[in-house]
Every structure is written in C-alpha cells, then in structure tokens.
Amino acid sequence: MEKNILSYETVALDDENSALVIIDQTKLPGKTEILNLHTGEEIWNAIYLLQVRGAPAIGVAAAMGIYLLAKKMPTDSFASFYEEFKKQKDYLNSSRPTAVNLSWALNRMEQKVLSLKELPVAEIVGGLKKEAELMKEEDIAVCKQIGENGLTLVNPGDGILTHCNAGQLATCKYGTATAPIYLGQERGYHFRVFADETRPLLQGARLTAYELQSAGVDVTLICDNMSATVMKKGWVNAVFVGCDRVAANGDTANKIGTSVVATVAKRYGVPVYICAPTSTIDLNTPTGDDIVIEERPAHEVTDMWYKEPMGPKGVKVFNPAFDVTDHELIAGIITENGIAYEPYTESLPKMVNRRNQK
Ligand code: MRU
C-alpha cells in the first residue's frame, strides 16, 4: 500500500533514544513533520499546543512521557523517586484540563509505581514502560471494538456526520468516531461521510477529512454552519462523535460545536452517538456542569490560519475548546464494552465495571 498519513503512528516510544515520537498535527495536512520529544517541557508543550491531541492519544502520550521522565529520576530510594514522579505527573497533568484520559493514564501509571514499590527503582521504571506500551495496545483494541459496536447502528450506504477529529490521529489506531467508518470501508459499506471543518483549530478539515480521504473514504468537507443543511436534505443517517469526558449522567464534553450539531440533529431526527472508550467515562463527575472546560487564547480565533488578522485588533474573544452535549440529545454512548443507553446513571457504570473485570 502507498505510504500516507495513516502509515504513521500517532504516538510512539523510541526507548533507545529516550524519545516520545509524534506527528506535529498543527502542520497537517500540508506537512508531515515528526517530532522527537525528550523533556517534560517538550511533552507538556506538545500537548498544550495540540501537536498531539485527541483524548486517547493525549493519555498514551502522557503515559509514555512519564515513563521517559522516570528513567531520569533519582534511584537512591523509593521515597525520592516517588516524590519526583508525583511532581512530574502533576506537571504533565496540568497541560490540558478537559480530557479525562490525561489524568486517567497518569493515575494508572502512579498505581503501577505503587504496586511495585518494594522493588528496586530500575524495576519500577521497567514496569512503567510495560504499562505505557500496554495502554497503547489496549487503545487499539478498544477503538476496534468501538468500531464493531458502532457498525451495528448503521447500514451500508448511510450518510455519517462527524465533528472535530476523533480519528486515527486522535488515538493509536482506527480512532473512535471513525472506527465504524474504517471497518465499514474494509467491508464495502460505502458510507458517505460529512466532516465539519471544526472552528477554530480546524481539526475536521485538516485532520479528519485528510485521514479519511487518505483511506479512500467518500468524505465531504463542510463548514460548521452547514450541518443543518445536509441534515435537512436527508443526507445524514447518524452522527458519530468522540468525547473528552463523559459525566455519570451521560452529559458529554467534546470539541466546541458538538452540542450545536446535536441540537440540530434532534430537530431533524438524526441519532447522535458518542464513541467513548471507557477510559473517557468519568463516574466521579456527576453532570456536565461539573466538567472543567478549557479556554484557549484569542489568536486562535482571530489570527491562526489566516494571512492577516480576521478580527479588529484588541477585540474581546471567547474561545472555549469544548462544549457539553446534554444527555437528552444523545441516542447512545458506544463503548468497547457495549452501547450505553438512557438512563446513563445505570448503564455507564455497567460499561466501566466490565472494563474493571477484564
Ligand atoms: O482539542 P482536541 O483536538 O484535542 O479535541 C479533540 C476532541 O474533541 C475529540 O473529539 C476527542 O478528544 C475524542 S478523540 C477520540
């Protein structure tokens, strides 16, 4: 097969050179630039600047990152190692607030440290490497299963709309919202996909349209304000989107604009499915009101991607990176352990418990 963007790994570990290897997603689709990150600051910046982004990919990047940092931590005693580990963990965790996968992955790495605390530090570090690699493998399997489960909800030839990028570039493979699309593609389903461009950072245009087109999927790029038009025309049978944090009641934080799509979809009777690895379900957060929404700098709205500023100098800008889709607007939450339906306070714990029992 010809090399394309899907031939690259979103997140990889180069242990020999102690590097976290990512594609700089801010340069796509024009340029495929690979970054080798070594320091905590480099990893923090890459997450903050969205060079690596998407909830599952951020989680795996942080897990590999903390392992690489652990390689350089004090080895004289567990206490001094653990103190430094917690410092670096908190630092990486501060890079972005909304996607729960970041803290989920870092907490899992901390649990690994604690479970090995009686062993020499070198062995604890070895355990962290295995755990980070396992998370990557698990992410691939989880996405594939989300794809299988999602595929049961659609039919060959269907129109599918997606927002932002919950694709391979946001995970280790397959994506979440794109997983049913990729599996359908392999099985001759001939889906017609509509990708919202996703202002202000254009993940839909730059990443989703790019990766789906590279895979030979029938993808049409639309501006964010066109979803009502394609739905009213009857071109969309289902909406598949990803998520950054699903609260216990099913309220879901995802890329800004998702709740607009869901509101419009309700009007036109199109079901909205959230594609959610159980690692993105946060049962400790009761409702969407309790989710911290990241706000990002003004220049992303006024200047980024434009040749000259597209807003008056000094204008007030509100730039939340995510919004919350109320659970009433969601037809189902597709996890690797099955599809959760209302009431989510009952169905989501079942999905999460199935993960814990594995
Ligand atoms: O700001 P981003 O690009 O990290 O936002 C990404 C999203 O909102 C995705 O839909 C979400 O993380 C799920 S990725 C499988």
Image (spheres, rainbow, N blue to C red):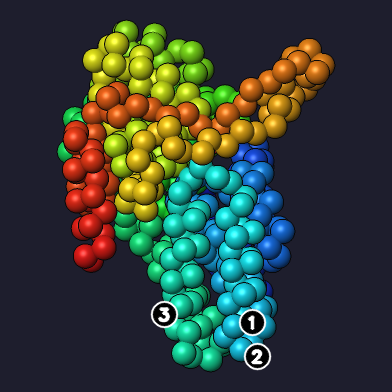
Q: Quadrant of the C terminus?
A: bottom left
Where disc 2 sits, the SS reads loop
Q: Is residue 24 above or below residue 274?
A: below
Does mark 1's beta carbon lie closer than 8 Å to ligand 1? no
Q: Residue at x 37, y 53 (%)?
A: 279
Whole-number angstrom distance, CA of label 1 to CA of label 3: 16 Å
Q: Position of residue 35 (x, y in %)?
A: 67, 56
Q: Residue at x 46, y 78 (%)?
A: 114
In the picture, measured across the screen, residue 152 lies left or right of residue 84, that is: left
Of the numbered discs 1 and 3, the one sitting upstream in the chain is 1
Q: Nearer the viewer, residue 206 or 191?
A: 206
Contact between labelled residues 1 and 2, with CB atoms less than 8 Å apart: yes
Disc sitting over residue 115 in the figure = 3
Of the numbered discs 3 and 2, the one sitting upstream in the chain is 2
Q: Nearer the viewer, residue 4 or 298?
A: 298
Disc sitting over residue 80 in the figure = 1
Amino acid at circle 2: Asp
